[in-house]
């Protein structure tokens, strides 16, 4: 590595290659890192080329530096504001008896009443 980079640092880099799994970013003449597809943006990324093109100069955040292999993990997502999560309204759970009681207003006919209705319907 020509320059000493630090985890958490935000630097400019040039997109030098795109693969289905991520984009390679040149940080200087001798140092390159990878923005994994999951670190491109929030949400699902089907095609990296929808977001980055070879030759683009972009800002990236250094997530990890592996000193032995000299691999640098980068992120563009870490520089973006996280989308707001929609909160589901939590409905209080009703007991089975409460749900039965709710439908009770619709009325339960006795089997005898229903039987009479069924006989009349089958005769039509």
Image (tube, helix red, strand yellow):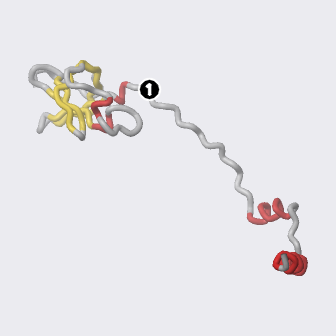
The quarter of the displayed image where residue 102 is located: bottom right
Q: In the image, is 97 to the left or to the right of 107?
A: left
Q: Quadrant of the C terminus?
A: bottom right
Picture quadrant where residue 10 is located:
top left
Front residue of 2 and 80: 80
Question: What percent of the width, then of the height, locates residue 12?
Answer: 24, 18
The answer to which image quadrant residue 112 occupies is bottom right
Q: Residue at the location (86% across, 80% down)? A: 119
Lateral position of residue 103 relative to residue 6, left or right = right
Q: Residue at x 18, y 22 (%)?
A: 27
> Which is more toward the observer, 66 or 13?
13
Q: Residue at x 36, y 29 (%)?
A: 78
**In this rendering, is residue 66 above or below 96?**
above
Q: Nearer the viewer, residue 87 or 44?
A: 44
Task: Give above or below for 108 relative to 43.
Answer: below
Task: Point out the image quarter for the N terminus.
Answer: top left
Does residue 87 appear left or right of residue 40 in this picture?
right
Q: Residue at x 24, y 18 (%)?
A: 57
Which x, y percent locates residue 104? 85, 64
Residue 71 x %, y %: 16, 35
Mark 1 packing: few (<14 Cα in 10 Å), some, or many (20+)? few
Above or below for 39 versus 117: above
Which residue is label 1 attached to? 81
């Amino acid at each position: 590595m020509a320059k000493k980079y630090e985890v958490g640092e935000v630097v400019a880099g040039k997109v030098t290659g795109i693969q289905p799994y991520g984009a390679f970013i040149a940080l200087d003449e001798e140092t390159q890192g990878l923005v994994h597809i999951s670190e491109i943006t929030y949400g699902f990324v089907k095609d990296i080329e929808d977001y980055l093109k070879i030759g683009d100069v972009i800002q990236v955040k250094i997530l990890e530096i592996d000193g032995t292999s000299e691999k640098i993990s980068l992120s563009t997502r870490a520089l973006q504001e996280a989308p707001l999560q929609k909160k589901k309204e939590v409905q209080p759970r009703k007991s089975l008896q409460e749900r039965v009681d709710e439908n009770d207003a619709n009325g339960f006919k006795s089997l005898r009443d229903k039987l009479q209705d069924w006989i009349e319907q089958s005769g039509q």
